[in-house]
């Protein structure tokens, strides 16, 4: 289709104006950093303790979140507060008096939704958004409380990316200490190239020998690919992911979370799949 000269001139001017607007636009949002705190602690066998879900630093604004937090029921027993609204974090409670809050507990996981309904109210962080109480078993061991899924919203839209950090709990045992070895603070996972088309190589760095499992989840927290598990030596290794699910089907473009679960710690990274 041939455009008349006047229309071509108008489109050219609009394109130039759009370019100037993009150049003047602020930098992209930082996302949300959320952690289960403290990320490492030792508790006495049979004791009751509290964990805090917190946005740990300023970032993208949000007015709501939902999360599924999982734990090992053989090691920990969840202790609900009554009413469950007492579990809401001070940062959310103090921001708005009109909220939607929903909480439910399953055998090994807790589902949380908390949304501020006051017009124009959003939070940039940092602050406490939820609290959870547990009772430890009487068996000395190292266990965990971790995010199976966590999402933030602002005005009904997803806030991305979300960076999450899980918690390790030593029950009568120093966290991360095994056979006198130091805590595995250097456990990391990364992906390159990122973004990627076709394949990406996942780099795993582990300071300790031990069991590991690596999996890929979509933005809703659903596992889409199991990349294997086993016992590995300390050091660096690489795992290739071809952007496909467990059935060999190409996954749609988007952001995926690659999670490494080791014996005493968890690490994760985000990878963007392009088509």
Image (cartoon, rainbow, N blue to C red):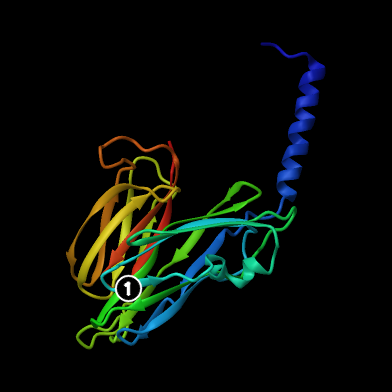
Q: Position of residue 264 (x, y in %)?
A: 29, 74
Frontmost residue, 86 versus 184: 86
| Residue to which mark 1 is pinned | 76
Residue occupying the point 62% across, 46% down: 156
Left or right, 201 with reference to 69: left
Whether residue 207 sits left or right of residue 159 in the image: it is left
- For the N terminus, which image quadrant? top right
Residue lying at 63% horizontally and 54% vertically, measured from the top left = 28
Name which quarter of the figure residue 266 lies in.
Answer: bottom left
Q: Residue 119 appears at what percent x and percent y? A: 74, 53
Residue furthest to the right in view is 6
Q: Nearer the viewer, residue 195 or 173?
A: 173
The C terminus is located in which quarter?
Answer: top left
Determine if residue 19 is in view. Answer: yes
**Would you say 145 lies left or right of 248 here?**
right
Tell me what residue is drawn at x 30 percent, y 80 percent: 176
View extreme (top): residue: 1
Q: Is residue 232 above or below residue 121?
A: below
* Rendering quarter of residue 94: bottom right
Residue 57 spot, x, y in % from top left: 59, 70
């Amino acid at each position: 289709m041939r455009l008349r000269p006047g229309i071509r001139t108008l489109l050219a001017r609009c394109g130039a104006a759009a370019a100037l607007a993009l150049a003047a636009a602020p930098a992209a949002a930082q996302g949300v950093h959320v952690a289960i705190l403290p990320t490492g602690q030792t508790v006495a066998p049979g004791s009751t303790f509290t964990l805090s879900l917190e946005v740990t630093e300023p970032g993208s604004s949000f007015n709501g979140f939902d999360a599924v937090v999982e734990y090992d029921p053989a090691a920990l027993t969840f202790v609900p507060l009554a009413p469950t609204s007492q579990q809401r974090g001070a940062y959310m409670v103090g921001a708005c008096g009109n909220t939607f809050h929903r909480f439910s507990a399953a055998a090994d996981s807790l589902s949380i939704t908390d949304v501020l309904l006051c017009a124009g109210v959003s939070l940039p962080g940092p602050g406490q958004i939820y609290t959870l109480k547990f009772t430890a078993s009487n068996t000395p061991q190292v266990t965990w409380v971790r995010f199976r899924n966590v999402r933030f919203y602002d005005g009904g839209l997803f806030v991305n990316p979300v960076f999450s950090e899980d918690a390790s709990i030593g029950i009568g045992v120093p966290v991360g200490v095994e056979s006198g070895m130091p805590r595995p603070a250097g456990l990391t996972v990364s992906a390159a190239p990122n973004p990627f088309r076709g394949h990406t190589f996942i780099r795993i760095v582990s300071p300790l020998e031990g069991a590991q499992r690596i999996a890929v989840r979509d933005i809703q927290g659903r596992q889409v690919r199991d990349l294997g598990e086993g016992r590995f030596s300390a050091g660096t290794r690489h795992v290739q992911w071809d952007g496909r699910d467990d059935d060999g089907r190409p996954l749609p473009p988007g952001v995926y979370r690659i999670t490494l679960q080791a014996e005493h710690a968890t690490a994760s990274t985000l990878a963007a799949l392009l088509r």
